[in-house]
Amino acid sequence: MRGYGQYCPVARGAEVLGDRWTLLIVREMLHGVCRFNELERCLPGISRSVLAQRLRHLQKVGLVVRDVDQRAVAYHLTPAGRDLVPVLQTLGDWAVTWAFGDPDPNELDPDLVVRWISRHLARDRLPHRRVVVGFEVLGRSTRWYWLVIDADEVSICRHDPGFPTDVVFRCDAETLYRIYLGDLSLSGARRGGRLALSGDARAVRQASGWFAWSTFAPAARAAGRRRAAATRA
């Protein structure tokens, strides 16, 4: 990236992080994604050459280290990279407050939102056993996903894993995104006919507490309340 030629912290930060895809690569790495192929899967639309170039840049500026063992290459954030957590949180909070309108249909990727949901579990509220949650995502072609949640890991399956399913979420991709991002509550989605929950009756009652949803959800809810108040005024 071409520099700005200014001795300014904002300019320097933009030089380090301002290239396309760079912040999203950091976002994924903050969630523990460390292998090249997995990063590529988590960033649909990025080319392998661009991903490789961005990783080299992040190594050069001291945000990422490249580790090689006998099995594979892994990329890990340095302390400087991990220190970007509040930066990304503040940026996301600002975006959902001031720069986040209705989604373009092309932005709604069920694979991504289910992956994001799997990262934000309310572990302290889950039953002390394996839990299986199904997602039937409606659209031109219905997609199925299962989260198999064990004590120390969560797996995403595209085919029935063969375990009893506790609860199934049935909705379209936009509804699932809006629930995850805090723009729509589970109860509101159900009342509005946008979401159906099925399965074990007790699991259906408890399922809303099993997920922590996005870290940007509080800001999104606050922005929604402000918009509603402005409309009423």
Image: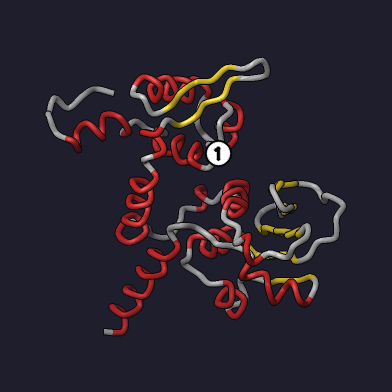
Q: Nearer the viewer, residue 197 or 139?
A: 197
- State left or right for residue 28 relative to residue 161: left
Residue at image position (52%, 26%) is: 75
Q: Percent x, y for residue 220?
A: 40, 64
- State left or right for residue 190 relative to residue 78: right
Count neighbours of disc 1 (C-alpha within 10 A) and say few if under 14, some if 14 to 19, many if 20 or more: some
Q: Percent x, y for residue 23?
A: 39, 37
Is there any visible trace of residue 150 in the rendered image? yes
- State left or right for residue 191 relative to residue 7: right
Question: Quick one: quadrant of the C terminus?
Answer: bottom left
Above or below — where is 201 with respect to 216? below
Q: How many discs appear?
A: 1
Q: Percent x, y for residue 147?
A: 71, 53
Residue at image position (62%, 17%) is: 69
What residue is pinned by disc 1? 32
Q: Nearer the viewer, residue 91 or 172?
A: 91
Residue at image position (72%, 73%) is: 204
Is there any visible trace of residue 144 in the rendered image? no
Residue 19, image quadrant: top left
Residue at image position (22%, 31%) is: 12
Residue 62, image quadrant: top left
Question: Quick one: quadrant of the N terminus?
Answer: top left
Q: Percent x, y for residue 99?
A: 32, 56
Q: Residue furthest bottom?
A: 233
Say which element carries label 1.
loop
Above or below — where is 226 with respect to 9? below
- State left or right for residue 25 relative to residue 201: left
Which amino acid lies under the numbered mark 1 shown in the image of this protein?
Gly
Q: Nearer the viewer, residue 150 or 181?
A: 150
Q: What colour scheme governs how the chains and residues are painted in the rendered image of this protein? A: secondary structure
